[in-house]
Amino acid sequence: MRIEQGQRLRTGQQLRMVPRIIQSMEVLQLPVAELRERLARELEQNVALEAVEPGIEMDLVRPDPERPIGADDPSAEGFERLREMERSYGDMLDGDDAPPRSRRHDGERDAKMDAMANTPSRGETLAERLLHEWRMADVRPELQAPGEAIIESLDADGLLDVPLATIDEERGGGRWGAALMERALAALQARLEPPGIAARDVRESLLLQIDAVLSGREGHAPVGDARQPWNDARTLVADHWDDLLENRLPRIEQRAHLPMARINAARDAMRRLRLAPGREVVDAGVQPVFPDVVVEYDADRDRYVAALADGGLPVLRVNPVYERMARDGGTDAAVREFVGTNVRSAEWLIEALQNRRSTLLRVVEEVIKRQRPWFDEGPEALRPLEMTEVADALGLHVATVSRAVAGKWMQTPRGIVELRRFFSGGAETADGEGASWEAVRGMVKDIVDAEDKARPLSDEAIAAALRDRGVTLARRTVVKYREQLGIPSARHRKVHGT
């Protein structure tokens, strides 16, 4: 074997994602709320990036062009650079036009510190809330530990879907026993709020809630005629649960010897009960929706006008002191390399923000043009639209369009809607224009809302009604859309005794 060394010249092509392009794609994909957080982090981490304060002229923050930057900084330490910035900004900071953050030492509050202080803390979980309540309850000492183990085993609905014997074995080592576990569970159900917590299934939870109403645990106990619907409700849940779930009310009428009017009154009373009492205790943590785009109707020109809702974002620029320091040959090499890296990163971020504004606005305007019937007539007029159509019309890659609409919301005269909602497939209609799946689901809902509740339409009848509107769907497709809308079957929608 012989080992040789040599050089060869070879040509080739390689696709490489440079950091500049990666950053641009990441910024394009961020919704406005996440983009605001991203910019806040960049402002903290990048010394060359700064936000332009409202009311401050750009010329006021320019350093003296005749004065060399960094000439007196022989080391890599930053103290001299801080003094240089103080000298460059000193006149402005001492004046009346000083930005709010420079007045902290004058007794005024710091906006950034206030924002951090006002950030809501993490809310209590269901288990934490119930454990605190249980430890404050007046119960026998031997019930405390098994009760805590049961609470930690509850699901998000506040129900217990784990056998007591399993909890005893896994958390108590089998030392508590079945009798003590049953006593602890009964104590939990009697003391924890709201009623229905720690039930072993929905049926038991409803019974606990009905008993709480009858006993006055949730306020004044009903008396007289007001008590009868709750007594009947307990009979339905305790003795006719399966028939109640399947809406077989005539069978309940026959077996329970209750008139249909009382059965319906009991069902109306039960609407006050909670199927998932645990979700009533803790905050679901739903985040507010911030629109990225605002669309308004211009009556004079009969057109819809789009504008980006990015007024809350800071206006960014490269700090002029660091910008000149990166170009000054007299600056220490290590300092110049550090500053230059931050200056380039700031420039790329500003460019990415400009690209995001341009791309998002172009995509929105194209969507408005192609989905004009939706804005004029409503959801049923939504037409099928593929992202490839918008990408081809704008000369963009389909992945760019996908990133532009990802997680974005649009405020329109018809409410706040997700931008991705305008992109969907559809079904052929009699007029050949097509209807989006969103529009078809809206038709299904309208048909069900208009039906005779005493004689609800079957899925086949709904399909026939859609054909009358020019949309042909198979029955199984109607079933899929009905279930997506949360609409029960015809048997469960039937109203008895009307």
Image (cartoon, rainbow, N blue to C red):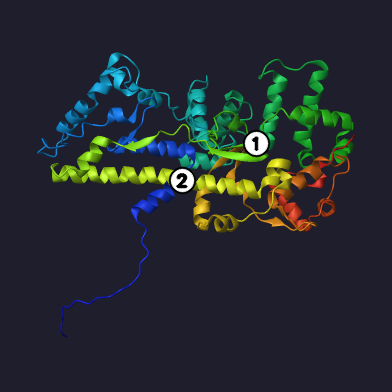
Q: Nearer the viewer, residue 40 or 411?
A: 411
Q: Nearer the viewer, residue 348 or 113?
A: 348
Image quarter (top left, top right, bottom left or bottom right) of the N terminus:
bottom left
| Residue 258 seen | no
Q: Amino acid at mark 2?
A: Arg
Q: Amino acid at mark 1?
A: Tyr
In this figure, which residue is indicated by the disc labeled 1? 297
In this figure, which residue is indicated by the disc labeled 2? 356
Residue at position x 76%, y 39% in the image: 241
* Residue 400 percent coordinates (x, y): 49, 54
Residue at position x 30%, y 30% in the image: 59
Give the secondary structure at mark 1: strand
Give the secondary structure at mark 2: helix
Q: Residues within 10 Å of mark 2 (few under 14, many from 20)?
A: many
Q: Nearer the viewer, residue 19 or 87?
A: 87
Residue at position x 71%, y 44% in the image: 379
Q: Is residue 400 left or right of residue 300?
A: left
Above/below status of 331 relative to 137: below
* Residue 37 percent coordinates (x, y): 41, 36
Q: Nearer the viewer, residue 143 or 418?
A: 418
Counting the numbered discs, the total is 2
Image quarter (top left, top right, bottom left or bottom right) of the C terminus:
top right
| Residue 156 seen | yes
